[in-house]
Amino acid sequence: MATKRDQQVIAIEEHYFDPELTQHFSSADEVPSGLRQRLEDVGELRLREMDEAGIDIQVLSHAPPGTQRLDPDSASLLATGVNDRLASIIKTNPQRFAGLASLPTPDAAAAADELERCVNQLGFKGAIIHGLTNGTFFDDKKFWPIFERAASLDVPIYIHPALPHPAVVDTYYQDYLTDYPGLETAAWGFTVETATAAIRIVLSGVLEKYPGIKIILGHLGEGIPFLLWRIDHALSRPGNKSLSFRDVFSEHFYVTTSGNFSDPALLCSIQEMGVDRILFSVDWPFVANDPGVEWMESLHLNNEDKTKILSENAKRILHIS
């Protein structure tokens, strides 16, 4: 199977639900029944929609909020089960599925060990983190053992959105949520929260301490490629600690097309970061497969660059053979 241009397609931010974990989600995390059906399906429906769109491989990752809001003991116990069950799902169809680990970040040491187990024993391709961990950004030094382990294993960490901090919601968005509930999530709240997390990671120094770290952002970089020159310029003004934000970001970060099928946004990302740092994804089932693949086929890029985005970059970064 391939696109109409006979190019293999690997989509790397494609979600599912583990019923045992979702029992611990709050009412704020509920999704419409149609989405839930797709999230819980890891067989016939999912594969049919992949086939119809021409997607060869989905890299499966649990949808937010993951285990990031649980207590340490519950997070560790649940993450182990979630990852074991995902490994079993992948084994049923290893030619079509790969996986990103769910990490119990409320216990950072356990999360680092779980990442190593998932990569070395289960064959996972990296890990995904959803938003803040019980109100704490991922750059906090207590999480640095996870970065260290990811660097030593040569696997990426995908920084994925989750609902913003409640205080941010109350201050920034609450006035408009009755009429525009999407403002809190994909329309703006997700972007602000995740971009802030990424900027903090650069400023924290963890990337210099563990230079092998690879970080992936969805949605074409949560707006950072568009703002990269300005962020770098502002942080270079007198009074700031010496840092080339642009260089550090461009050395360690990769971005995906998930849920952002925009020609100008993609071209900006390519111009700022280079085509070798762009990976295809859809954000299924929150976004349908067909528009993403059709958009890639219609882009005015040469076939070599399209092949890099559609599959070759994912193969290199995630070690997919």
Image: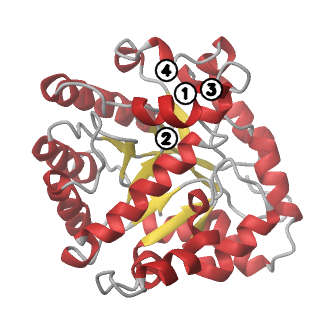
Q: Nearer the viewer, residue 316 or 286?
A: 286
Labelled disc at residue 60: 2
Alpha carbon distance from label 4 to label 1: 20 Å
SS at circle 4? helix
Q: Position of residue 40 (x, y in %)?
A: 53, 20
Q: Residues within 10 Å of mark 3 (few under 14, many from 20)?
A: few
SS at circle 2? strand
Q: Answer above or below: position of 50 versus 197.
A: above
Could you tell me which residue is drawn at 54 percent across and 27 percent down? Answer: 42
Q: Looking at numbered disc 2 in the image, what kind of residue is underneath it?
A: Leu
* Image depth: mark 2 or mark 1 in front: 2
Instruction: Tell me whether the residue at label 2 lies in contact with that at label 1, contact meaning CB atoms closer than 8 angstroms.
Output: yes
Q: Nearer the viewer, residue 70 or 86?
A: 70
SS at circle 1? loop
Q: N-terminal of the two: label 1 or label 3?
A: 1
Could you tell me which residue is drawn at 61 percent across and 65 percent down? Answer: 311
Residue at the front extreme, as displayed: 239
Labelled disc at residue 42: 1
Q: Residues within 10 Å of mark 4 (few under 14, many from 20)?
A: few
Q: Answer above or below: position of 123 versus 242.
A: above
Q: N-terminal of the two: label 3 or label 2?
A: 2
Q: Is residue 216 visible?
A: yes
The quadrant in which residue 43 appears is top right
Q: Looking at numbered disc 3 in the image, what kind of residue is underneath it?
A: Asp
Residue to which mark 4 is pinned = 29
Q: Looking at numbered disc 1 in the image, what kind of residue is underneath it?
A: Val
Q: Position of residue 55 (x, y in %)?
A: 69, 48
Q: Looking at numbered disc 4 in the image, what kind of residue is underneath it?
A: Asp
Instruction: Tell me whether the residue at label 3 lies in contact with that at label 2, contact meaning CB atoms closer than 8 angstroms.
Output: no
* Image depth: mark 3 or mark 2 in front: 3
Color encoding of the figure = secondary structure
* Image depth: mark 4 or mark 1 in front: 4
